[in-house]
Amino acid sequence: MKIRIALIAICLLISFSGKAQFYHTGDNPWSVKWQKLETSHFRIIYPQGMDSLAIVYGKTLERYRIPDSRSLGMVPGALQWGKTPVVMHAFYGIANGSVIWTPKRMDLYTVQEPYSPDPSPWVSNLVVHETRHLGQMQFGYRRLLKGFNFVFGEMAAGAFAGIYPNLAILEGDAVVAETALTHSGRGRNADFLNYYRMAFDSGDYRNWWQWRYGSQRHYAPNHYALGYMTIAGMRYAYDDTLFTKNYFDYVGFHPLHIGDMQKTIKRDSGMKFKKAFLNIQKSFHTIWAEDEALRAPFIDSIPATTAVRRYTNYYGNEYVHDGVYSVKSGMTSSSHLVKVNADGTQENLGPFSSYHSPLRHYGDTIYWSEHKPDPRWSMRSFSIIRGRIASTGKTFTIGDRHSRYYSPSASAGNELSVTEYPFKGSSRLLVMDNRTGSVKRTYKAPDSLQIVESCRIGKDIYFSGVSGKGIGIYKLGGEVAEMVIAPEPVSLRNLKSLGSLITFTCDRTGTDEIYSLDTKTFALKQLTNTRYGAEDYCFNAKADTLYYSSLTATGKALFKIPTAALIGRNVSFTDVHKYIVAEKLAEQETALAQSAGEAVVGQSPEVQADTSRYRKGAHMFNFHSWAPIYVNIDKVQGESYDYDYEEASTGLTGIFQDRLGTTSGFVGYSLHEDPNDDNKLRHSGHLKINYFGFYPVIEASLDVNDRDAYQYTNRIVEYNGKQSKRTYKSLGNSPYVSSKIRLYVPLDFTGGGWSRGLIPQVNYEISNDRYDNAKVHYDYDGCMLNATPRDTQYGAFPTITGYDSGSNPLMQKLTVSLRGYSVLPKAASQVYPSLGIGAEAGFNARPGMTASFTPSAYLYMYGYVPGLTQVQGLRLTGTFQQQFSTSGRFRENYVQTAPRGFSNMSSAKNYLEDNYPWQMKFSADYAIPVWLGDWSFLCPVLYVRNFVLMPNIDYSVYSDGGLFSTGCTFGVHMANFFWLPYDSTFGIVAQFNGGSMYQKLEDAGYKMENSYVGITFNISM
């Protein structure tokens, strides 16, 4: 019990100081003006000029508010103060949403899902899912937890969401809601639980924690799928309609208990957690096995790719000339474009974007669309068309920083048909030149219809479209769309043309299969019948072989089958598979609604179009959280504090952040001992503010009265014929005031599979400490060295022999730097990326004090190269530092150049810094992941994914020689740490030290150690 209480306090501190809880969504363009729309329970904040879109979202939010609460037991907005802010991000190019509680808000990214949409409008899917999250957050305001909100503000509920419900429970419950309350949802998507289907067929029944946290070796689906299977399984297998309500009730009444989810499952199922979850898995397996028996027999296909050891996917396939072009990614590699030849060999054609459309081609050119971030504003992004000429490898781009182009389809006449999603909503189909991108024709989608993919047959354009009834196929023979296949609640993707046929993938049977539609006879044929689905298909040039991706235990591999062997079965598009578990969920929601005398989902309520201007300036200082202690966020995160009171002390803290992410920071009051007088207390004030609204980000801080200001003075001392410099510190008569400001521009040039960035920055610090550059010359011959002109105990006064005048400026520091990087994303089983390079160069100086403090310039470079295996990797770094003035009293290093094994030899490090104007350091770290099984026996406290062995070497170069440190770190990689859902590593480091300068430092009287053993701990938040 005491342990859990301590952890609650720790998590509150983490939510206070960590980026994981004070969530900065991103930077919106400074030029955007905002409006607000008030509904009964929501305050919708949206970009000016998008009133119609805001009204649609307002109606939908109010429509699903009560239905979303019935099986949860908590009504969104019922227990919190005031209306829930909802921020509509219309300029972001990826469909998503989130509910954040520091400060509380719902963020909705309104662009429609372009590549794999559910068969219902994006606004409905998004609102149902996020409103469920909004309801879940109410548990932090109930019962025994509600008092913490008065003490800590909104960060209390945010911290409780991190401590209690596993992320799988939160997301899985939201997927249950979207499945039960609409005719679609991921619970009715064949691909969503497909890996579990395959795993259970092969007897792969893992425990809950192994499915949740995955493995360094074995693939596991994401937490959305696991959470859905857990909660839907409880509701189906045990008829436990109110499982989520029971769970949150249990937490509210037993906040100090460990394993709340396991205890709720045990209580509701009547059996131990492990057995209950095994029964859930077997219940799903039974359903799937019965379905497979009805669908059998399955087609026999030939593997087109060789077997792999770890999970690898091939997707977006397209046949060009003599091979299949595919995007390959997996647990050991980020996304790459490859060409699979007829004999199964592969050619790696380079990195590829992680968010893109399937490949399409015409002639010698392959086309696709991919996400493109704005260089500066992270909440504005675009989608462009990329092309690659297969014979030469040359690439080109269609679109610019204002494009929202998706899913290109090439055809004769040098034309592309492209889906466009304008910022204000709706969708359009553009016909453009396939090289210049000039738009020839534009077709606006009919009301309430989302255009997804298109293809061309002759002069006619066919497209798939999402409406409130599902996904259908439509024809554009003129200006008006004509329905070809009426919409059904199924998934439909990969729309292509083959002669007079339209081909596509659809999950109408409960698995993804390939279909053809004859545009002359309108006959619909099912071409494949597979156990685990056929996706991302393509025909070869002669159309006598079909290639497709299908799930195996080690990923979605590429298969091929002769076209003559396809089943070609006539089917009806209206004959749609019923998902037994999803139907059960819907029945339960219907029963709950009927017991309340309500419709499951009612009509959208009227929303008044009364809008007003939302002024960012009036909401800059939105205080959402507070604490009855003072905590310095920067000092805790950076561990750079000089005194304990600078990290935390008695006092008060208030945290503010506006809901658009333009301004954030904190104010604080601290009461602590005076560092210069143990009998005196200090009342100190603190302010930190970050402003993201200008092109350069501005971070500024102010600290007042932590101590008295200091006055530093210099002496030139002569004693026994030797001269030395000494600096003295005395207390001033004014309170200490310190201020810092940092300006930086985070430029993002990510594209083509590479994460690229450039960050110029300027840091400036100033305080009312003063440094007197004047020098007083003293002759101490005949008296003790420590004597001063007022000292008499030494028997003689030192003689003042001279005075060098100088200024007495305020202490200040200026650093200018430029950082750049280009790195491949790190795959799940890797410690380091496969390839990458980065560098930072900077200049550091104290203006007005360069005669006493040496300016310095530095260069830091790093790079990643592949190791001997796909999961191993080598990291190389190089550091150079040059101090420009040799006459300065103090040599200030901006970077550390001593080898890592010298970390506990402060006197030796100070000597190196003070005596060598230039310094270099080279390092190499080789990461070797070691898998010894997935250790879940300590769950939910700890889960061990793997171990990491990391031999390393540092070599530092100085003008008199060199020093080296070589050794190894052995760490354990944990997927959670004491209930906190963050990756962490705990390890032991051992180093051996040496080098040509080692003996010189010992001879000079510096304490040296030829070995070092310590521990290391890192937690990623």
Image (cartoon, rainbow, N blue to C red):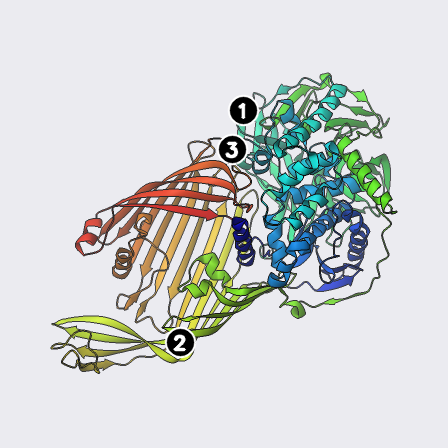
Q: Are marks 3 and 2 in contact (CB under 8 Å)?
A: no
For residue 560, above or below residue 595: above
| Badge number at residue 345 | 1
Q: Earlier in the sequence, mark 2 or mark 1?
A: 1
Local crowd size for mark 1, using a 10 Å CA cut-off: few (<14), some (14–19), many (≥20): few
Q: Nearer the viewer, mark 2 or mark 1?
A: 2
Amino acid type assigned to the residue bearing label 3 in the image? Asp
Q: Work out whether residue 298 or residue 371 is closer to the camera in this orientation and state it.
A: 298
Q: Earlier in the sequence, mark 1 or mark 3?
A: 1
How far apart are the alpha carbons under marks 1 and 3?
33 Å
Task: Give how far across and how far down residue 519 sits, in percent.
Answer: 83, 29
Res. 522 in view: yes
| Badge number at residue 934 | 3
Amino acid type assigned to the residue bearing label 2 in the image? Asp
Local crowd size for mark 2, using a 10 Å CA cut-off: few (<14), some (14–19), many (≥20): many
Q: To which quarter of the image does residue 201 belong?
A: top right
Res. 110 in view: no
How far apart are the alpha carbons under marks 2 and 1?
73 Å
How far apart are the alpha carbons under marks 3 and 2?
55 Å
Amino acid type assigned to the residue bearing label 1 in the image? Thr
Quickly name the residue at label 2: 708
Task: Give how far across and how far down residue 857 sits, in percent.
Answer: 36, 60
Q: Work out whether residue 723 or residue 427 is closer to the camera in this orientation and state it.
A: 723
Q: Are marks 2 and 1 in contact (CB under 8 Å)?
A: no
Task: Give how far across and how far down residue 921 sits, in percent.
Answer: 32, 50
Q: Earlier in the sequence, mark 3 or mark 2?
A: 2
- Going 80% across and 54% down the picture, which residue do you hit? 62
Q: To which quarter of the image does residue 363 belong?
A: top right
| Badge number at residue 281 | none
Task: Give how far across and how far down residue 244 sits, in percent.
Answer: 71, 43
